[in-house]
Amino acid sequence: MDGCHGLGRRRDRRHGGCARGAGGRGMSAEYRVDLDAFARNLSRVRAAVAPARHMLVLKDDAYAHGQDAIVRRALEEGVTWFGAFDVATGRAVREITGPDARIFVWLLGDAHDLAAGVAADLDLGIGNEELLDDLGGIAPPTPARVHLKIDTGLHRNGIRPERWDAALTRLTALVDAGAATFEGIWSHISEASDADDDDARELFLAARSAAVQAGLAPRFSHLAASAAGFARESFREDIVRVGAFSYGIRPAGGPGEGELGIEPIGALTAAVVEVDADVVRIDVGHLHGLPSTLRGRFSAATPAGPRTVRSIDATTSVIDAWTGAAVGDEVTVFGRGGAASATDLAELIDTIGEEIALRVSSVVPRRYTANGSRPAR
């Protein structure tokens, strides 16, 4: 390689000399998020799961789209339930939403998490009996809003069916003591097959019936996430937890975005930093989250149309050139406006679309557009 290949100046062989690269003028790569497209997805989700309420899931910085901007726009669009994964995230979301939104968290490790969740006015997803004991031990100043999780077969925590009655007994004692209110019963399902999900739903309904018989009637029931929430009316219950579809990420091996009525809201873009006779180099690579195993297997969108991505290096990638290619030309690597979506790439390496989105590094700046505006921080 010539002396311009590092992270500083790069040679533009078509024009001669070197062009500024990532090290010389800062990274050109951006993850662009269209908040108006996000709003349209929220409207579509709301219509698809009605009359159930939509809980917007925010795990991993809103699926790498940037939590603060996503929460603020969701509030403007009337979202009142947020799934914030853990207490730290829940507290951050509460700072944005104020007191009116309901914020559900379910990664709870100990009494400290429980106390912090109650203090932040969060809804607590509890999936083991030990946490019920911990809740009794902290004597919260206000009743904890408990959503009790039944393990319906996915084994992603949750109380085993054979221990459900014992858990209900413990929860009854907490409710009677004023330490808790029974807000909900919930579970995860695998969405691997209709038959598996039907079996899971039967366990869920039996657990809810047992709770009612024990004098614990939940205010809310929630079982379904994106796919089941859209496809299976009987699974919607009172709340549907929708993450991926809200961001326009379709399921791998499932219906397309058009069929679902959703659209990708994020796009990974980068500028050309080096031009050769047959290829160009852009300043985004596997350290920014683009899987190196995708090299040679997909196309990026260029000003002249799709071009194959030939190699994915640490901080740059090489794609086929086009007539008139120049340093500074913009390429959409994947996502909105690109030749491939996150799920298109995921299917090539046997994973799911949200995994591709979540890989986009936090060092890549997020830029937001709304109401036809230009990208802005």
Image (cartoon, grey):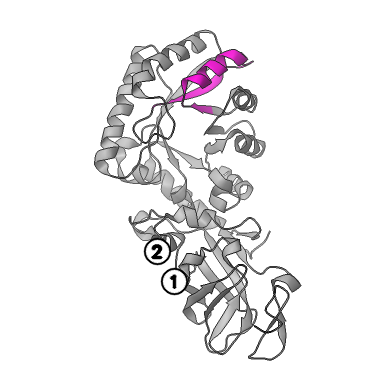
Instruction: Report the side of 375 relative to 128 (left or right).
Output: right
Tell me the element at label 2: helix
- State if disc 1 and disc 2 touch (CB < 8 Å): yes
Q: Which is nearer the eye, 35 or 129?
A: 129
Work out which residue is located at the far right of the displayed protein and give it. 24
In the image, what residue type sits under mark 2? Leu
Label annotation for residue 26: none
In this orientation, does residue 372 appear? Answer: no
Q: Find the magenta span and give its range.
A: 124-150
Q: List the residue tagged with mark 1.
A: 298
Number of other residues with Cα within 10 Å of mark 1, as a class: few under 14, some 14 to 19, many 20 or more: some
Q: Is residue 182 above or below residue 280?
A: above
User: Could you give the CA–CA distance between mark 2 and mark 1, rounded to whole angstroms?
Assistant: 8 Å
Q: In which quadrant will I find the N terminus? A: bottom right
Work out which residue is located at the far left of the displayed protein and give it. 195
Q: Position of residue 36 (x, y in %)?
A: 54, 56
In this orientation, does residue 299 appear? Answer: yes
Q: Which is nearer the eye, 98 or 333?
A: 333
Q: In which quadrant will I find the C terminus? A: bottom right
Number of other residues with Cα within 10 Å of mark 2, as a class: few under 14, some 14 to 19, many 20 or more: some
Q: Residue at x 52, y 86 (%)?
A: 322
Instruction: Report the side of 27 relative to 82 (left or right).
Output: right
Q: Position of residue 358 (x, y in %)?
A: 53, 53
Q: Which is nearer the eye, 279 or 241?
A: 279
Q: Residue at x 66, y 69 (%)?
A: 28
Q: Residue at x 47, y 46 (%)?
A: 243
Q: List the residue tagged with mark 2.
A: 348
